[in-house]
Amino acid sequence: MIRRGVDDGLLHLTAEDTILDGRSIRVDGKTLIHFGSCSYLGLELDPRVKAAAIDAITRYGAHFSSSRAYVSVPLYSQLESLAERIFGAPVVITPTTTLGHFSALPVLLEPDDAVLIDHQAHHSLQLATQILVARGVHVESVRHNNLEHLTERIEALQDSKRHIWYIADGIYSMFGNLCPVDELVEMLDVYPKLHLYIDDAHGVSWCGKFGRGYALSRAAAQERLIVATTLGKCFGAGGSVLVLGTEEQRRFIRTVGGPMIFAGPVPPAILGAAIESARIHLSDELKTLQGELLERIRLCNRMLLERDLPLVADTEVPVRYVEVGPYETAQKLTKQMMDAGFYVNAAFFPAVPKGRAGLRFTITRHQNPEDIEAMVETMTHALMHREAPFATKLSAVQLQHETTIEAIDPVVWDACLGQRGTFDWRGMSLLEDVFANAAKPEDRWDFHYYVARDEDGEVLLATFFTEALWKDDMLAPAKVSADIEAQRGDDPFLMTSKVLAMGSLLTEGNHLFIRRKPGWKEAFEMLLDVVEEHADLNGCQGLVLRDLPATDKPLAEILQKRGYGRQSMPASFLIDIKWSNGNEFIEQLSPKSRRYQRRYVLPHQDKYSRMITSASELQASDELVARFYDLYSDVCQRNLGINTFPLPPETFSRMSADRDWEFVLLYVETAEEVTDHLAAAVACFKGWDQYVPMLIGLDYEFVENHGVYRQALSHIIERGRELGYQKIRLGMGADLEKRRFGAKPEYNCLYLRNVDES
């Protein structure tokens, strides 16, 4: 395919400019706006950086031709000193990132180690691991960004291997998607043998404090985390940096790393330029440069999404990728863009998987907003006016419908929805155990799972619906629900309806996975056809699509055209943990919330003791589960803000035996018999990237006088921090109390179709 790209005029091009300005490039006699540069901040043309390169040549010559094993030009030590300030860890400068990999990996790994490498990791990493194979190191590929598969392989290898290294990119250079660094760092605590090696070539400079990059903005430097990055992209110079966990690692690689002995050094001009760029990175000016770039990235993303272009990764990174399918489509569209005055990269196999060719383009500070707007408009026009041969990817969508999660591939389900809340594959299995065959009609749910794929088998859409009995006043004001509940004494099913709804009454979050590529709208329309027909045939009074982002205009347009009414949902609250102890937690709150904590929360903390029960720790007794259920039932009767049928007791029994759930229990400290004074109990889900307290029970004797609900919030937040989570999803209701703990609201909406009126 590379030769074909060359023959088609897409690759091996030469810039014909005599002077480059960063914004434009001349190719084949035509000046084009340049959307192919990786110098995202534009530092390569900064006058100070250029002057520093000239000064270095003047003082040290065009080249310092000596191996670093013997002697280095003085600029090396200056650059390494500045780089250590930028990255906050010991560093080694290497000529290129590839040579950095070749210097570090063969030195750090032993034959009794294992390597798990993301199958989309950069070619330089794939090449470096082949050296390890020759040395007897076990190397295998794992599915892209699939933490479940990674976990399986770690657990399979950890008993027989000294260390297990996971190798990945920080930001993937074609699609612009992100490595799950937060989750990987959590896994370091779980698996002592795990080490991380991340190539963050596309993350440096434009991201993080001092421009230290995406990976190190998410994780502090540590012994079991190695980051390799380049100074030849956004840094605006050349060479590469290995950011190491210990001084001993730095010394070892510097001493015996093959390229450190035998490869040529970085030229003085490049070192001089890198030193001046490093000084800019360490100045306040960098934040301004990063902010200007981020504004351009957000402008581009907003326009791409508003025009419904198939952007693969909706991330705020400079690399953008619009997927179009076959090579022929990408080739044609790239030529159309060039004819219109825009240089973008055609991407195809082997740079991306077969059948996923597209247009790759980059956002830099050299471009102005008008350039970006014009480029996106041109791309939109080109995609909308393709001839028929290039539109075949929009057809042949297949929709899979199952009535049990057992029929869905766990890897596929969790890759789409596993990190969004309590409804990963195992979570759905729990819900089915409790509700699929429940005896009472209000507890019985029918489950429907939908997965849509394109003709290549790639998932375009995944979601689930439940058919259940809803109270018509579920989202009504609490006073209205109180009046209706008074009328339900003789008839508990008064003013209730059978509803087919996305998600379930025991899950929260965005239940709809959509891959925004050609065919997704057809898949979504097909889903709506199927669920609408099911609702009509099965006597459902309502059809609800819920927890959808209020800002998703393309979805809103489709649903409103089909007659769905839109309704705002109660705010859902999320806490981002950015503190490491109680004092830091208090200090990051607003002044008013700090006063509230010190007056109403902290004085009561010594009145309670906390206990954790889970299937993996202390098993909850039947008596404890029963007591929890009593407290939960009391909350249901009193709190009518979201009015639903109480969950069956089996819900709590099943959670108590599941490894993904735990109970956080608060006891009154002063009680003589502690077990008789359980004041609060919370059932919490331990997800991949968030801690989710789902169900709460309270002894109202302690709510007003002892502030037990506030104490429950406090302990939940602390428990999430102890487990290493950075996000806690507190859900809906009790808005004011949650805000006082620093929780931020998220606003979603639901779309309702009344079946009997359609």
Image (cartoon, rainbow, N blue to C red):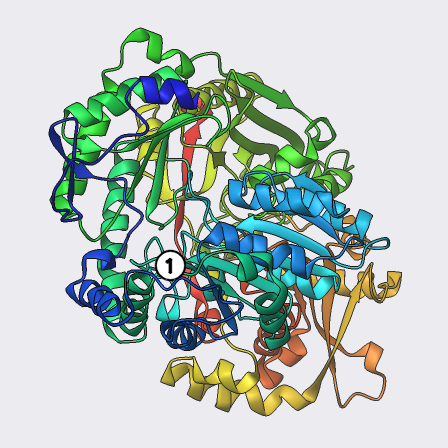
* Vertical comparison of 497 with 487: above or below: above
Closer to us: 380 or 606:
380
Which residue appears at 70% of the width and 57% of the height?
A: 109
Q: Is residue 551 visible?
A: yes
Q: Percent x, y for residue 715? A: 63, 75
Q: Nearer the viewer, residue 501 or 111?
A: 111
Element under label 1? loop
The N terminus - image quarter: top left
Label count reads 1
Q: Quadrant of residue 637?
A: bottom right
Residue in front for this viewpoint, 562 or 295: 295
Horizontal side of 10 relative to 601 (left or right) equals: left
Q: For mark 1, does the 10 Å Cα neighbourhood hold few (<14), some (14 to 19), or many (20 or more) residues?
A: many
Please state the horizontal and vertical placement of residue 613, each as a whole percent of the image.
Answer: 79, 66
In the depicted structure, whether residue 116 falls above or below residue 254 = above
Disc 1 marks which amino acid?
A: Leu
Instruction: Determine which residue is flagged by label 1.
Output: 231
Snapshot quadrant of residue 390: top left
Picture coordinates of residue 573, whole percent (x, y) = 47, 61
Residue 326 at what x, y percent from top left? 41, 18
Residue drawn where x is 40% and y is 16% of the image: 394
Q: Is residue 648 visible?
A: no
Looking at the picture, tell me which residue is in the foreground, 286 or 432: 286
Quarter holding the C terminus is top left
